């Protein structure tokens, strides 16, 4: 009976003759069967590796079947528990069933076909239980309050803890903050967090990207204009400075601002007075400044892109956002966060990332930092159906070469080589890595299972069929690895 392949059965009976008959009967049942003669031996076998189904005699010296199955029910609630029993014990059995300690019973002497049918039912139930447990865990993970780090940031890494504590310290002051860091590393998130931590949190936070606005419009964007100041100025208009009055003005990509305008900005910061374009009088504004650039400020100063006096006026406190590759463990956290976000947005259901996909997330260099990761996960949600995001899907989304995948999974630094050809990519989808040395059986088994699940695009039932084992075997192993990961 192929449906039983991969399910693990434990038979417990103190009579060797009974075990012999059971062994003979189970020969046609392609399942992993263990036969033991006592309750203690059964518990020891469970401690080695839990079973899907246990069938125990009721009357045994030292530990009877009811006691054994009650202990198994406590420790391994997902195991199906059956007893082999004589008619005289029926009332005892019924109360054990009512209390949930056992799932069913088989009368001795049994009819082989009836026993096999009961075992088949037990296995089908076990698959449902295991699947439900996995779904419950997944749901719990997604419903649990997410550790968002701090003020809209996701990330627990040590470099981010430093960022959080610096923001907390500067938040309450009025000091200008100059934020540096590579593109997409979260400089705007940091600016918003500084504002949220300050007494100005109930006043406006206005962000202006100096690189996105043409130079000739920039002055009016920051300082506003009066009607008739230039052609097109059909009415008076407040600029970002007036809008930010009482709050925070975040000037992103400051080094891209026209150098002459930087002089006007410096005057504004020094005097607190601002004159709209075309206006004759100045307005006094109360503003906290936070600025950012992707460039090294000293280099930008040397290159004549950033006024030195402006930089030092603004950089009362400096905050350097670390690139994502230096935030150990954060990529997987961020990926989970964005997966949930985009799955909700796209109305799709995802359980998470395959183990190798998580490894890949954490070892990839993320040259575009959090923004790249965010876009990558959005792409994966749109292009995949779930429930698992596999490493193959990630390889495609990141346009990696097959050899880069192996390097990344081995935890080596990866080079940013260009896009893999579709042909090269399909090699990854079908071929497990070539073993170069003798590896532990457990490792080979795990690779084979992960490969099968990935190959079946996360469909555990299909993967189990392809591997010739029952889904419950795969669910059990996935669960064990998940537990092991959680405890490391
Ligand atoms: N730690 C984080 N947790 C959650 N989301 C983040 C985090 N860091 C950045 N993001 C998100 O990543 C995207 C890019 O972040 P942000 O715009 O703040 O980067 P930036 O450094 O200002 O980029 P640029 O230099 O290109 O202006 C945004 O969608 C932001 O919400």
Image (cartoon, rainbow, N blue to C red):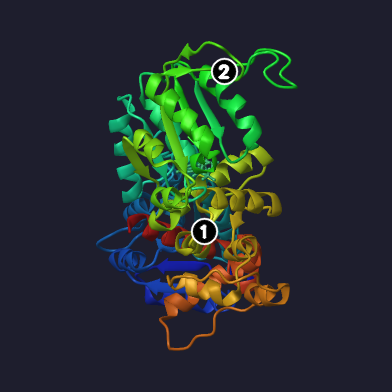
In percent of width and height, residue 368 lies at 54, 54
Q: Is residue 364 above or below residue 442?
A: above
Query: CA–CA distance between discs 1 and 2?
Result: 40 Å
The image quarter in which residue 404 lies: bottom right
Residue located 42% across and 83% down the image = 439
- Can residue 131 be seen here? The reply is no
Report how many numbered discs are placed on residues in the image: 2
* Image-based side of 13 in relation to 40, left or right: right
**Helix, strand or loop status at disc 2:** loop
Per the rendering, the mark at residue 49 is: none
391 or 88, which is in the foreground?
A: 391
> Tag 2 or tag 1, which sits nearer the N-term?
2
In percent of width and height, residue 92 lies at 40, 47
Q: Which corner quadrant holds the C terminus?
A: bottom left
300 or 18, which is in the foreground?
A: 300
Residue bearing the label numbered 2: 276
Q: Is residue 419 above or below residue 325?
A: below
Residue bearing the label numbered 1: 367
Q: Foreground mark, 1 or 2?
A: 2
- Can residue 150 be seen here? The reply is yes
410 or 293, which is in the foreground?
A: 293
The image quarter in which residue 94 lies: top left
**Helix, strand or loop status at disc 1:** loop
């Amino acid at each position: 009976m192929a449906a039983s392949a991969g399910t693990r059965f434990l038979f417990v009976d103190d009579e060797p003759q009974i075990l012999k008959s059971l062994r003979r009967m189970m020969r046609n049942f392609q399942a992993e069967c263990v036969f033991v003669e006592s309750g203690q031996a059964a518990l020891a076998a469970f401690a080695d590796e839990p079973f899907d189904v246990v069938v125990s005699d009721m009357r045994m010296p030292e530990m009877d079947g009811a006691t054994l199955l009650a202990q198994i029910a406590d420790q391994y609630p997902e195991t199906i528990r059956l007893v082999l029993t004589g008619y005289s014990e029926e009332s005892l059995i019924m109360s054990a069933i009512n209390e949930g300690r056992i799932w069913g019973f088989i009368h001795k002497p049994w009819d082989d076909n009836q026993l096999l049918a009961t075992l088949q039912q037990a296995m089908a139930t076990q698959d449902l239980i295991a699947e439900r447990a996995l779904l419950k865990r997944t749901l719990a993970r997604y419903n649990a309050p997410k550790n968002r780090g701090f003020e809209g940031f996701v990330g627990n890494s040590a470099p981010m803890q430093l960022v959080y504590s610096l923001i907390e310290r500067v938040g309450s002051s009025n000091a200008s903050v100059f934020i540096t860091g590579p593109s997409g590393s979260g400089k705007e998130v940091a600016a918003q967090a500084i504002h949220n931590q300050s007494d100005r949190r109930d006043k406006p936070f206005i962000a202006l990207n100096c690189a996105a606005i043409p130079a000739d419009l920039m002055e009016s964007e920051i300082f506003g204009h009066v009607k008739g100041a230039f052609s097109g100025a059909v009415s008076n208009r407040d600029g970002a400075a007036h809008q930010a009055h009482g709050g925070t003005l975040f000037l992103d990509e400051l080094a891209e601002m026209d150098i002459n305008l930087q002089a006007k900005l410096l005057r504004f910061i020094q005097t607190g007075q601002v004159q709209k374009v075309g206006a004759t009088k100045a307005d006094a504004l109360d503003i906290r400044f936070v600025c950012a650039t992707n460039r090294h400020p000293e280099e930008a100063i040397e290159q004549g892109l950033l006024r030195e006096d402006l930089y030092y006026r603004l950089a009362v406190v400096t905050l350097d956002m670390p690139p994502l590759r230096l935030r150990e463990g954060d990529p997987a956290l961020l990926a989970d966060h964005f997966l949930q976000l985009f799955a909700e947005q796209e109305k799709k259901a995802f359980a998470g990332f395959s183990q190798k996909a998580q490894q890949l997330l954490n070892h990839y260099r993320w040259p575009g930092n959090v923004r790249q990761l965010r876009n990558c996960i959005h792409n994966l949600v749109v292009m995949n159906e779930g429930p698992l995001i596999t490493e193959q899907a990630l390889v495609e989304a990141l346009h990696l070469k097959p050899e880069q995948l192996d390097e990344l999974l081995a935890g080596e630094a990866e080079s940013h080589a260009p896009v893999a050809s579709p042909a090269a990519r399909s090699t990854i989808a079908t071929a497990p890595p070539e073993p170069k040395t003798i590896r532990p059986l457990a490792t080979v088994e795990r690779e084979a299972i992960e490969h099968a699940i990935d190959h079946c695009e996360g469909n555990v039932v299909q993967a189990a069929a392809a591997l010739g084992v029952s889904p419950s075997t795969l669910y059990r192993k996935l669960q064990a690895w998940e537990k092991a990961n959680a405890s490391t």
